[in-house]
Amino acid sequence: MPDWLTLYYNEPIEIVGGKGCRVVDASGKSYLDFFAGILTNMIGYDVPEVREAVERQLATGVVHTSTVYLLRGQIELAEKIARLSGIEDAKVFFTNSGTEANEAALLLATYARRSDQVLAMRQSYHGRSFGTAGVTGNRSWRNNSLSPLNVHFLHGTDRHLPQFRGMSDAEYIAACVEDLRHVLATAAGGDVAALIAEPVQGVGGFTMAPDGLFAAYKEVLDAEGILFVSDEVQTGWGRTGSAFFGIRNHGVTPDMMTFAKGLGNGFAVGGVVARGDLMDAPHATGLSTFGGNPVSMAAANATLDYVLDHDLQANAARTGALIIDGLREAAPRLPIVGDVRGKGLMFAVELIDPATGAPSPELAAAFMEESRKAGLLVGKGGLHGNVLRMAPPLTLTTEEAAEGLGIVVAALETVNAQVAP
Ligand SMILES: Cc1ncc(COP(=O)(O)O)c(C=O)c1O
């Protein structure tokens, strides 16, 4: 297998069992899971409603038919997602992954606008294919500049840069909007198809634009007919607590949203929900062989119903606030903590060298080992690999939130004591 498929931890963990928000490794050690298979085990492990829905489908003997036959599960799920999206006359196309979902959205946008120009955000991540790597603005996830698209990268998620430091949200938003206008007036050649953006950047280390930035961008985009695609692969389904789709934190309804990861609670499902006129426009026939297969549809319908029936968005807001507030309270006495940020059950701690203020991937690695020892799984990310990313299942209880927070703070204290005694 490729060298670039990296494993966490000095001694990799093999997860062999799971229940609720906990997993067990091959040695029998149990962990509270604050990363959930990269936000994908969205409602936790071994959820009876999901397991039974999948088992019912397996019992029919049919795990695949292809989309040339009617797939009831697809229609049911598409109708739910279209309704939840708030997008006008929405239609849904199912894929197997976030990468494919973004490819589909880019195809729709470039086709509708007859343009190969796309705007994307710096530090973004949208997938590993030719097109989605092209709109990825994070060097550690890009091997070269080859791209089927002409891409201009915008500010908006980089207010740590010296030129923006000290600005209020309003001032930063104004500066970014001016930059967007300038890019359109100077760098773009003719019509631009779309802006694609993550409301909270996942791989980028949960960096995010201040609320309101995308609404301000959208005014400029609308004036030129430029479409807006929100990549909700990490931020969808109530994860941010304050909104069901991350982009709603900005008061924006986009022209399209893409999704994947959590929707199937581990079963492979992705897709794009788009304005009907955009979705229907391409003249060529299209399909995805495995996209929206009966098994993943059974899992996804059960997962989405569970999220809605249990109002997990409210739970994300409640338990997320408990953890984020706790982290913010601890940060001032921990010089290794450069920043605490997040929304709902999507939060991060950025680690820095206390002497220089430089990003410290070494301290992040030390934290990973400490938290592992204490029985907590977290993720890592950011441009420099120095950001601890955490996104537990949306079913996290208040007790589990307090337990996880305690482990994170204790591990930060241990690492802090090693470098800043
Ligand atoms: C925001 C975002 N978009 C797209 C993708 C790609 O999804 P996949 O790995 O399912 O292709 C990811 C994966 O991490 C992501 O975080």
Image (tube, rainbow, N blue to C red):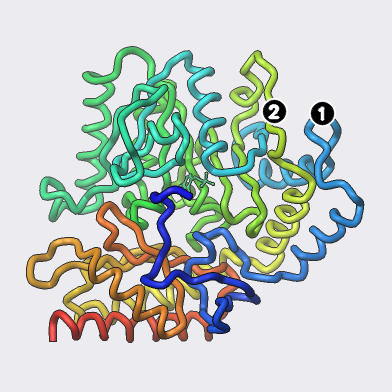
The image shows residue 394, relative to residue 413, as above or below, that is above
Q: Secondary structure at mark 2?
A: loop
The foreground one among 4 and 316 is 4
Graded by Cα atoms within 10 Å as few (under 14), some (14 to 19) or many (20 or more), the crowding at tag 2 reads few
Residue pointed to by mark 2: 287
Residue 351: horizontal and vertical position, in percent?
24, 68
User: Are the residues flagged by discs 2 and 1 in contact, CB closer than 8 Å?
Assistant: yes
Residue 256: horizontal and vertical position, in percent?
54, 35
Amino acid carrying label 1: it is Val
* Residue at 53% from the left image edge and 86% from the top image edge: 399
Q: Secondary structure at mark 1?
A: loop
* Residue at 66% from the left image edge and 31% from the top image edge: 89
Residue 271: horizontal and vertical position, in percent?
61, 40
- Which label number is shown at residue 226? none
Q: Is mark 2 within 8 Å of ligand 1?
A: no
**Closer to the N terminus: mark 2 or mark 1?**
1
> How many labels sit on residues?
2
- Which label number is shown at residue 68? 1
Q: Quadrant of the C terminus?
A: bottom left
The foreground one among 265 and 238 is 265
Residue that sits furthest to the left in the current view: 355
* Residue at 56% from the left image edge and 58% from the top image edge: 40
> Would you say residue 89 is visible in this rendering?
yes
The quadrant where residue 138 appears? top left
Residue that sits furthest to the right in the current view: 60
> How far apart are labels 2 and 1 at the CA level?
9 Å
Is 8 on the left or on the right of 268, as rendered?
A: left
* Residue at 35% from the left image edge and 22% from the top image edge: 150
Is 30 on the left or on the right of 302, as rendered?
A: left
Amino acid carrying label 2: it is Leu
The foreground one among 155 and 43 is 43
Residue 364: horizontal and vertical position, in percent?
28, 69
